[in-house]
Amino acid sequence: MENINNLNNSQAALAQNSGDNLHAIAGFVIIIIILLVWSMVWKGFALWKAARNSSKPWFIILLVLSTLGILEILYIFVFSKMGESKKCACGKNSTCKCKEIK
């Protein structure tokens, strides 16, 4: 009889541990999904900005590397502003003949 009680107790402990594991796995999956969405939003915006700036090296670097948005944020707010030149109203650079610089 004692063996049956020990077996029931161990089964109950196993069931509780598996329930705890499921909660941990669910929490981990939620964190991964949040990080993926975060990274995809910043990557999309940075790739769009690199393409608009005609910056092929930055576009390739941002496309290949996965840094959870860190490099993308730096590109958007720091590096993309470094190479900007004034553009005229027609969309060309400042050497355009129309001379209507924004």
Image: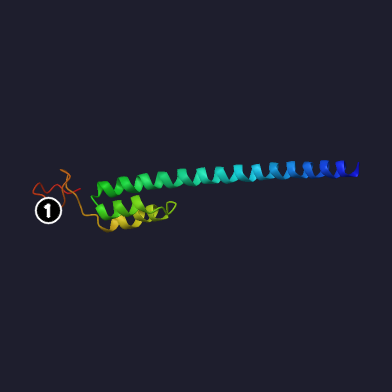
Q: Tell me residue 66's x, y (percent).
A: 41, 52
Q: Nearer the viewer, residue 78 or 63?
A: 63
Q: Tell me residue 51's x, y (percent).
A: 26, 47
Q: Where 69 sits versus 1, above or below?
A: below
Q: Secondary structure at mark 1?
A: loop
Q: Relative to 86, is 78 on the left or the right? A: right
Q: Tell me residue 70's x, y (percent).
A: 42, 55
Can residue 68 be seen? Answer: yes
Q: Where 26 sits versus 68, above or below?
A: above
Q: Relative to 101, is 17 on the left or the right? A: right
Quadrant hosting residue 16: top right
Q: Relative to 29, is 70 on the left or the right? A: left
Type of the residue with mark 1: Thr
Can residue 76 be seen? Answer: no
Looking at the rendering, in which quadrant would you find the N terminus? top right
Residue found farthest to the left: 97
Residue found farthest to the right: 1
Q: Nearer the viewer, residue 90 or 31?
A: 31
Q: Residues within 10 Å of mark 1 (few under 14, many from 20)?
A: few
Residue hosting label 1: 95
Identify the colour scheme used: rainbow
Q: Tell me residue 24's x, y (percent).
A: 63, 46
Q: How many marks?
A: 1
Residue in view at x 20 percent, y 52 percent:
86
Residue in view at x 38 percent, y 54 percent:
65
Residue in view at x 47 percent, y 45 percent:
36
